[in-house]
Amino acid sequence: MAQAKPNTIQKLKSWFLAGDKDLAMLRAQLTVLSGQLPMMYGILLISSWALAITHMSIAPDWLTLYPLVIATVIVVFRSIDWLRLDPASLSKKQAISRVQAVIRLSVIISVAFTTWSLMLFEYGDVLDKAHVSFYMAVTVISCIFCLGSVPQAALIVSIVVNGTFVGFFLFSDTVFFRAAAVNVTLVCTGMLFVMRQSYRHFCHMVEEEVRSKQLIEVNKRLANRDSLTDLANRRAFYNALERQCMEACQSRNSIAVGAIDLDGFKPINDMYGHMVGDLLLKQVGLRLQTLASQFPGTDFFRVGGDEFSFIVSEPCSDGDSHLIGEQICAVMQRPFDIDNSEVAISATVGIAHFDPDMDSFQDVIEKADFALYQGKRNERGTCTIFSEYLHCQQRRTTQIQHALKSEGLSDEITPVFQPIVDIVHDRIIAVEALARWNSVSLGNVMPSEFIPVAETSGCVADITKIVVEKSLAAARDWPSALQLSVNLSAKDVSDEDLLMWIYQRIVRSDIAPQRINLEVTETAFGTDSSKVEEHLRLFRHLGCGVSLDDFGVGHSSLSRLHHLPLTKIKIDKSFVSNLNREARNFTIVKSLLNLARDIELDCIVEGVETEQELKLLRELQVNMVQGFYYSKPLSQEHLIELLSQNGDLSAGSLRQSA
C-alpha cells in the first residue's frame, strides 16, 4: 500500500518539532546555539537586572529581586550546560530532543519575560514605563537574533513578545507607546524576513559542507581502497598499522602482521594475459574477505601486484596467528574457476608479532617480509612465523647487506672454477665461474647466504662485475680450447647497463667470444621476457653461448624454449640425486635429454657425485656432466696447476686430484 503524503498540518507540526531535519543540520544548529544561547542568556539577564534595579524603589521585592535571583541561578547553569555541549557526539534522537527543548523553552521564556515586563509597567512614572517598553523592544530583538539558527524558537518569541507588546501598546492613550508599537512591528517583520533569508543561507552552507565531507570521504575511500579486489590498499595498510602499533604501545597488547605472496601467479598472468590475472586477483580478494569475517579483528590489504598483507588487531598468540596463516594457505590452494577453467596457485605467508618495547611499525613489516622470504626459500605454500631463530638470521642478513656495500668488496670476492666434462671423450671442455666471498668482517660467507641477499638488496650486479672481470683475466692463462661459463641472475639479465658493460668487457678482452658462455635461470624470463630475449640475442650475435641453468624446475621453459636464443640446457641436480633409486628421476632426465636432442641443444647434467650416477647417465647417452664426482670448484692456482700437468685437458687428472 502506498504511503499517504503528509498534509499541511502534519508538515507544520513536523517543522515545529524539528523532525524534518537530518542529523548534520541538527548538529549544525546546536553548534551555533552552543555559542549564541549563553550570549542571549547574558544579554537577557543583564538587561533584566538593569530594569529591576530601576524599579526596586517603586515595586515590591517579589517582583524585582526574587525573580531575578532565581533566573540568574537558572541562567548560569543553562549557560554552562550549553558551553560544555559537544554536538558531534549526539545521536539524531538526542539532537532532536535538544532542539525541541530550545523550542519549548522559548515559549516559557517569552511568556515569563512578557508577563514580568507588563507587571512592572504598572509601577512608576512615564519614564519608568518608557524604560519597560524600550526593554521589551530591544531585548526581544537580541533574543530573535540569537535564536536565528532555530527559526521555530525565534518565531515563537517574536509572536509572543511582540504580539503582546503591539496589542498592549497599540491601544494605549499615549502617542509615544502607539508609535513604538508600530515601530516594533515593522522592525520585527523586517527581522523575521532577514532571519528567514539567513536561515536559508545557513541551511545551504550546511548542505554544502555535508556534500563536501561526503566527497572527501568518497575520495578518501578511493585513495585507500584497491579498485580491483575492493580490499584496502598499501596506503591504508601503512596508516592502519602505524595507528594500531601506537595503540598497542599504550595498551601493551600484541598485534600480528602478515605478508602474503601468491605462488604461481606470474606464470598464469604471463601465459593467459592480464585479464585472466585480474579475474584471479578478484577471486583472491573475495576469499580473503571471507576469511576476515571468520577471524574477528583481522583486516586484509592488497599492497602490490600479487602481494597482500593483513593485520590481526585482536591479541593473539603464535598459535592463533599460525592458524590464520594456515587457513590462508589452505584457502588459496583450492582451485579457482576462471572463465570455466580451473586455475591452481598457492600462497606463502610470513607472520610477525609487534613487540611494543622493541619494534616500530616498520620493524614488524620487515620481520613479516623476512618470514615470508624464508618461507618461499624453504617451502612455498606454507606459513612461517617470525621466531628468535629467524631474528638471528635477519641480523645475519643485515650484516651481510652492510658488508656487501663495503669499499673493499672487489678484493674480497674471488671466482672459483668448476670443470664441465665431456664424458664421451673424457675431456674438460669448460669451467663454470662461481663467486666466493671471504669478508674481512664476516669471514667466509657461503654463496647460498650472500647471493640471495645481494639480489634482494640490489648488490648482485656489483658481484657479477667482479666475477666477470676476474674470470676473463684468469681465462687468458688457459688453453684456447677451454671455455668459460659465467652465471647471470634474473636481475642481471634485466639490467641493460650491466649487460652492456659485460658486452664491452668481452669485446675488449683477449678471449674469443666463442669461448664465453652465459648461464641464466628460467626465473630470468618471468617478467619482461621479450626484453631479456633481446639482450641475450645480442650476445649470441657476438658469438657467445647461452645456457639455460637449472632446467626442469622452472615454469616457462617448455613453452618458451623454442623462442629463446639458447645453445645449451643444464639439467638441474635435483633430478640426478638418487637417480639409481628413483625411477621417476630417471624418467624425467631421459625425457629432458630427448627434448634437448629434438630441438638440437647441447645438454649438461649437473650434480653428478657418484660413479653409479655417472654409469646411469652414460646409459642415457649423456655427453656432458658437472659435479663433485669429477671436481669441486677450484681456485685459479689449482686449476692452472692441473692444466699445466695435463695439456690435453684429460678429465683423468680431475679424478686423481679429487
Image (spheres, helix red, strand yellow):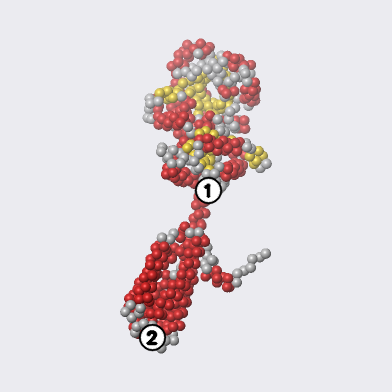
Q: Image check: 349 left or right of 600? A: left
Q: Residues within 10 Å of mark 2 (few under 14, many from 20)?
A: few
Residue type at mark 2?
Phe
At mark 2, the secondary structure is helix
Q: Who comes first in sequence, dot 1 or dot 2?
A: 2
Residue 582 lies in quadrant: top right
Q: Image check: 50 left or right of 415? A: left
- Residue drawn at 53 percent across, 14 percent down: 651
Q: Image check: 625 left or right of 359? A: right
Find residue 65 and report its horizontal and vertical position in percent. Answer: 35, 74
Q: Is residue 332 above or below residue 239?
A: above
Pointer 1: what residue?
225
- Residue drawn at 65 percent across, 41 percent down: 337
Pointer 2: what residue?
176
- Residue drawn at 40 percent across, 80 percent down: 119
Find residue 180 and report its horizontal and vertical position in percent. Answer: 40, 83
Which of the image's four quarters has the N terminus? bottom right
Q: Can you see residue 70? A: yes
Find residue 652 and report its horizontal and vertical position in percent. Answer: 53, 11
Q: Can you see residue 502? A: no
Residue 562 lies in quadrant: top right
Residue type at mark 1?
Arg
- Tally the marks: 2
Mark 1 vs mark 2, CA separation in Å: 71 Å
Find residue 492 and report its horizontal and vertical position in percent. Answer: 49, 32
Nearer the observer, 90 or 73: 73
Q: Is residue 628 above or below residue 55?
A: above
